Each structure stands twice: as structure tokens, then as C-alpha cells.
Image (cartoon, rainbow, N blue to C red):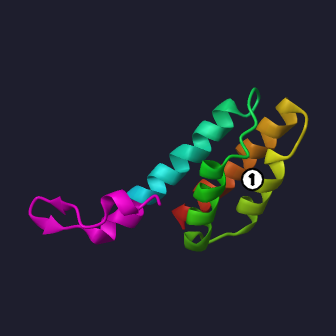
Amino acid sequence: MFSKPYEGVKHFGIWADESACSHGSKDALAVLEDALARCRDQDMRTTDVLAALDYLEPQAARQWPFQSFRSALDMQNPETRWQNLNAALNGIRRSFDQ
């Protein structure tokens, strides 16, 4: 879903399928960042957010932040939900830095 639009795209005359995954990951992270920004006011347990988590998780060095993110989506208190999503998203970002 996330890397599909980038597959087979030519970049300066070179097929760049290997970068499709990289671009897809950036798009998936953007979905999670948007979820964090809107989670205080909206229910972000959407198919797009869950698809982003499912797309990123197999590529990550750490798995725990993904389960933490999913759990935080279910929290009732908006501020607690935001704090836990923020911590989980930071963990997801760090899992790609390694």
C-alpha cells in the first residue's frame, strides 16, 4: 500500500525500486505523525493508521513500539493517549535509526 506508488518509477533514467520501500516508510510514518496530531480530538483507530503500523513493523529493528502504539490508540483520556502515542512513535522512529 505505501510503497506501491513508488515501484517502477524512473529517477534520472534509473529504475529506483529499492527506494520505493524507503518512500513508503516515510509515507507510513507521516500517517502515524498525523494520528498523533489528531488523537486528542479524534478516534485514530483507522484502517490507514493500522495499515501504516502493519507496513512498518516487519521492517523495524524493535517491535515493542508498534504494540504500544496500538494499545495507546485505545486509551480513553486524550492527554494520556497523546503522551503514550508520542512515546511509541519516538520508539518507532528510533527503531529505524539502527
Instruction: Give me the residue at 30% from left, 65% from top.
Output: 7
Measured as percent of width and height from the top left, residue 45 is found at 73, 46
**In terms of depth relative to the viewer, which is nearer, 43 or 28?**
43
Instruction: Give me the residue at 38% from left, 62% from top.
Output: 4
User: Element at badge 1?
Assistant: helix
Q: Amino acid at mark 1?
A: Phe
Is residue 9 rendered magenta in the image?
Answer: yes
Q: Residues within 10 Å of mark 1 (few under 14, many from 20)?
A: many
Residue lying farthest to the front in this orientation: 47
Q: Quadrant of the C terminus?
A: bottom right
Measured as percent of width and height from the top left, residue 8 is found at 24, 67
Instruction: Give me the residue at 55% from left, 71% from top.
Output: 59
Instruction: Give me the residue at 70% from left, 69% from top.
Output: 63
Is residue 91 rendered magenta in the image?
Answer: no
Question: Quarter of the image holding residue 34?
Answer: top right
Residue lying farthest to the top in this orientation: 41
| Magenta-drawn segment | 1-22
Q: In the shown orientation, is residue 3 left or right of residue 54?
A: left
Q: Which residue in the structure is indicated by mark 1?
A: 69
